Image (tube, rainbow, N blue to C red):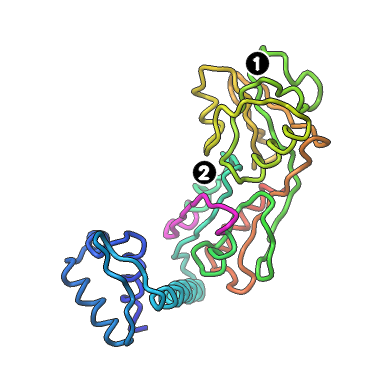
Amino acid sequence: MRHLQSFRYVKAIVETGSIRGAAETLAISPSALNRHIQALELDLDIQLFERLTRGVRLSPEGEIFYAYALSQLSGFARVRNQINNIRGLSIGSVKLGLSQDIHCGSLYRLISEFQRDNNNVDVEIEHIHQSVLFEKLRDGSLDLALFVNPVLRRGMNVLHALDLEVSAFVPNGIGLGRSEALKVYELQNMRIALPPAGTEVTTRILAASERFRVDAQRNYCGPDVLEHLEHAHLPLVGCLVIAEQRDQPLQLAGYKRISMDQRDVGTCSLCLVASEDRGLSGPAYKFQELLSVLFQ
């Protein structure tokens, strides 16, 4: 336990990229932080950081130590949560990752409900890419992740899953989506708004457009597709996955919501995943129980 403060210091330096920046977030002087790191390096007989013209970066030995530090910090937080649970307290934090092709308006209401009954638990939300999902769950940077078609690996536990159609939001009055589902060919020469490149929804829409030789104009590719549609001056069709409670379907003023044809783009699997090896803290377990309403 004696190195916990050192672990926090190293984490802050890595996240800010400099000793001065870390000192500001830690509310200590840069000189004091630098002395602490030098003493730690002397104690461990390794060089943690390479000093650059601007800031610092981890040395190869530092990379190994940093991974160890993160695991120790996460382990300590988990132990503390377990002790608090035994005492009947609900104290700690829940860290949730979201894939960027999900819109989950219900999430904020669920967080409010959760914190009403667990007002000493912090909730942190982070949008993440598929490439970092497994590592963040494994090292404890995330407790849970709400993800579209996660690449499952040994050590990942699927807590809940639900097949969902890709939703399209079509501007009223442009004559699209007259049938039960929107066909990809109907996007010909249309401006479309998509989640960030590399997400499952965007990959599927672009692949289907190429397969059917549809020339759709990617007018927007980024987070918060619905927010972009709300402020768009041009007619745009937005595509994404909606995580919601069945009795509270999301609608957007000025748009008709319709499903993309499954024969063109298939369905997506919305999953709530966690690390199988680490287990869930008490607060994280309670939070995932609340999120289960999105899968009913």
The residue carrying mark 1 is 172
On the image, the x and y values in percent for residue 29 come to 17, 66
Residue at horizontal 27 percent and vertical 62 percent from the top: 55
Amino acid type at circle 2 is Tyr
Q: Which of 270 and 205 is in front in this view?
A: 205
Q: In this view, does 131 lie to the left or right of 157?
A: left
- Of labels 1 and 2, the one closer to you: 1
Amino acid type at circle 1 is Asn
Residue at horizontal 55 percent and vertical 17 percent from the top: 234
Q: Marks 1 and 2, how far apart in space?
A: 28 Å
On the image, the x and y values in percent for residue 241 come to 66, 39
In the rendered view, tell whether residue 134 sits above or below residue 191.
below
On the image, the x and y values in percent for residue 156 come to 66, 66
Disc 1 is placed on an element classified as loop
Res. 166 in view: yes
In the rendered view, tell whether residue 279 sits above or below residue 266.
below
The residue carrying mark 2 is 108
Residue at horizontal 61 percent and vertical 67 percent from the top: 275
In the rendered view, tell whether residue 210 sits above or below residue 96.
above
- Residue 60 is labelled as none
Q: Is residue 289 left or right of residue 262?
A: left
In the rendered structure, which segment of residues is drawn in magenta? Answer: 116-132
On the image, the x and y values in percent for residue 176 come to 73, 18
Disc 2 is placed on an element classified as helix
